[in-house]
Structure formats: structure tokens, C-alpha cells
Amino acid sequence: MSTDRSHDWDKTWAEVNTTITEQDVWLLTDRIKFRYLSRLVPSGVNSLEVGCGSAKLSALLAAQGAKIVGLDLSAEALRAARDNFSWLRIYGDLVRGDAFHLPFANERFDVVLSTGLFEHFQDPVPLVAEMVRILRPGGLFFSDIAPLKFSLLRMGYFLRGYHKQQSDEYPYSSRDIRAWLEKCDLQNIRVLSSGVVPPLGLLRRIPFARSLSFRAERLWTIFDGTIISKWLGFFYLAFATKAG
Ligand SMILES: C[S@@+](CC[C@H](N)C(=O)[O-])C[C@H]1O[C@@H](n2cnc3c(N)ncnc32)[C@H](O)[C@@H]1O
């Protein structure tokens, strides 16, 4: 089974509470991604999230009518995903497996997605290629990549110099991301800097901050694709289609 360079994901998921609750400030980032995806994903499509972790984005898609599958190699991640599905009262299949050898037939899904996966690998191209294999011609490929870079969200982490000691992410650029997708013959590629959001860890401690930041959701996307989000954004969003 292939894995990234150092991370013990079972340990992470056992320690971190990623369940969607009324206190979950991190859901803001998934809601931003969902704003984009919801316009592109019609109700009833078959969607697979690879390295799904807590599968929050897939859960939001299911609430809109998608038939979702989440795959992860960590059993603890799948437990977090199951909790989120219960919280949102949606149904989704969860599969334990390796992103490098997806246990699905060619062209099985209308949509394949990953969030926060590729930046953990020195060469994500085999992962992209495997996702493209199971995507139907004309289907939608979506990924969000949160590389090692400064952002408003992770300001404290960078100012304290933690990124020099403990990161297991690679510092990928939008150009790197585009090159991976081109190598896998994807078409209509769009890579957008995004995720100019406040330091969410701090928001947890401030009364009403969660609901206010969620209400201002559109505000957090106005810099998307600009130089400001390139400097201050937490992630890149990549969209593409498989040749039909
Ligand atoms: C940063 S997390 C993704 C978080 C997720 N987007 C969420 O919203 O919770 C990366 C995930 O990729 C999974 N992963 C890492 N290598 C994998 C592999 N080779 N196959 C399947 N999943 C993998 C990890 O177990 C982890 O759950």
C-alpha cells in the first residue's frame, strides 16, 4: 500500500475532532469549495472522493443529491466520515483502500475529487492518473491542494516557524498542479488560488464568530484567482474534464 512520507493518518484522525457540529469552524473551507462544485455537479451523479478523510465536502454534495463514495486508507478517517454522514443525515458508501490502486472499474464515476491529498506526495501524477482512469469521459475532476505556503489561515504557524520543523506538505505552485493534470490528458483545466479565510483556530474561541464567518461566506471568495489569494490563500482549486 502506498502512503506519503511520514504521516500516520490513523493517529491524526484518532486525535482530531473533525465531526461537523455547531462549533465546527473548519467547515467554512468546505463550504467555499462546495460553492464552486455545487454549480458543476448535477443532482444524482456518482461521485468518488479519494483520500476522503472526514469527507465533509462529499457529505455536502450528498445533501444536494449526489451518490457519494469516500475512499481512505485510514480506518479512523472513515469513522470520522461516518459520524459526519450521520450528523448531516445523508447516505454515502465508505471504502477502505489505496488511492494508487482504486478498487473500481474504468470510467465508473461522473465526478472524482480529492481535498488536501496531493500535497502530501512527492509525485502526485500516479494518483491523478488513477483518478482519471475511473472517471467517465466528459466527467469532472476536482481537487483542492493546500501546499506548504504562507496563508492568512496559517499565519501563526508560519510566524512561529513551525513549517520548518514539522510539515509533511510539499510547496506546490499552481503551475505544478496544472502540469500534473496536463500529464494525465485532462482538458479544460482551471487552477484557481483560493481560501483567503481568517485563522479559523482563533475563531473557535470567539462567540458568534462561526455564524458570522459563515454568513460572510461570499466575502471569503472575492479574492479568488487574484494575486491576493496567491499570497494569502490556503489552497488552490483545480477543475478539469476527461476527454469525451
Ligand atoms: C489531509 S487528509 C484529507 C482531509 C479531508 N479532505 C477532509 O476533509 O477531512 C488526507 C487523507 O488522505 C488519506 N490518504 C493518504 N494516503 C492515502 C492513500 N495512499 N490512499 C488513500 N488515502 C490516503 C489519509 O488517510 C487522510 O485521511
Image: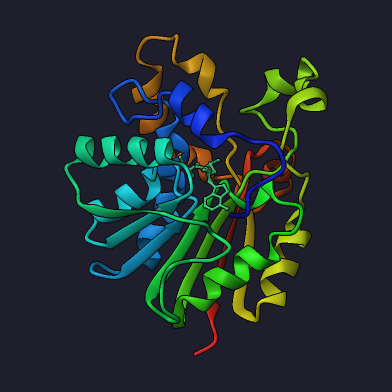
Residue 34 showing in the rendered view: yes
- Compared to residue 234, the image places residue 60 above or below, namely below
What residue do we see at 69% from left, 18% from top?
156
Residue 71 image point, x, y percent: 42, 54
- Compared to residue 139, the image places residue 141 above or below, namely above
Nearer the observer, 13 or 101: 101
| Name of the residue lying farthest toward the bottom | 244
What residue do we see at 53% from left, 14% from top?
202
Residue 140 image point, x, y percent: 46, 72
Residue 68 image point, x, y percent: 30, 59
- Compared to residue 206, the image places residue 177 above or below, namely below
Nearer the observer, 104 or 224: 104
Residue 240 showing in the rendered view: no
Is 21 displayed left or right of 37 in the figure?
A: left
Is 35 displayed left or right of 128 in the figure?
A: left
Nearer the observer, 16 or 56: 16
Is 116 displayed left or right of 91 in the figure?
A: right
In the rendered view of the protein, which quadrant contains the N terminus? bottom right
Quadrant of residue 158 in the image? top right
| Name of the residue lying farthest toward the front | 1
Residue 167 image point, x, y percent: 73, 31
Quadrant of residue 180 in the image? bottom right
Nearer the observer, 65 or 184: 184
What residue do we see at 70% from left, 21% from top?
157
What residue do we see at 25% from left, 54% from top?
92
